[in-house]
Image (spheres, rainbow, N blue to C red):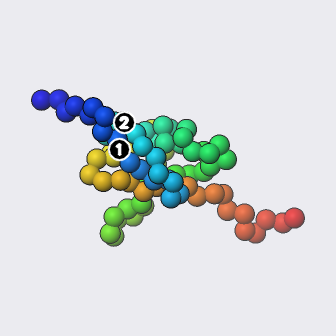
Amino acid sequence: MEKEHGNRKYLYFVDGVKYEHQEPQISGAAIKVKLPEERRAYPLYLEGHGNEPDLLITEDSIVSLEHGAKHLYTVPAATFGMQK
């Protein structure tokens, strides 16, 4: 039996900002396209639960949005050590 998603909205957060998606899965590319342009080039990570490590999300990665909202974050390029 196929699940019907209907009007259900799946939630996820990136850098503390809430986003909604109509399907129970989303690709890394689809997540990044919704981000502000300056953050799209940054690496994207899915927060791990408990002792699980955070997971790098590539454009080809698929993130399940079932079983509660997912929390992701971007990491800007390091600028320490740069000479002016």
Quadrant of the image containing the C terminus? bottom right
Q: Vertically, is 25 above or below 12?
A: above
Task: Pick the residue in front: 59 or 7.
Answer: 7
Task: Pick the residue in front: 60 or 16.
Answer: 16
Q: Label 1: how many residues lie within 10 Å, few (<14), some (14-19) or many (20+)?
A: many
Q: How far apart are labels 1 and 2 at the CA level?
A: 6 Å
For mark 1, give the secondary structure: strand
Please tell me which residue is depicted at 84% across the width and 66% down the height of the picture: 83
* Image x and y of residue 2, in percent: 17, 29
Please tell me which residue is depicted at 46% across the width and 46% down the height of the picture: 19
Drawn side of residue 1 relative to residue 47, left or right: left
In this view, the residue farthest toward the front is 7
In this view, the residue farthest toward the left is 1
Drawn side of residue 40 relative to residue 82, left or right: left
Dot 1 amino acid type: Tyr
Q: Vertically, is 77 above or below 3?
A: below
Q: Quadrant of residue 7?
A: top left
Residue on which disc 2 sits = 22
Dot 2 amino acid type: Gln
Q: Are marks 1 and 2 in contact (CB under 8 Å)?
A: yes
Please tell me which residue is depicted at 38% across the width and 48% down the height of the picture: 11
Work out whether mark 1 precedes mark 2 in sequence or the reverse, and give the earlier one.
Answer: 1
Task: Pick the residue in front: 83 or 42.
Answer: 42
Residue on which disc 1 sits = 10
For mark 2, give the secondary structure: loop
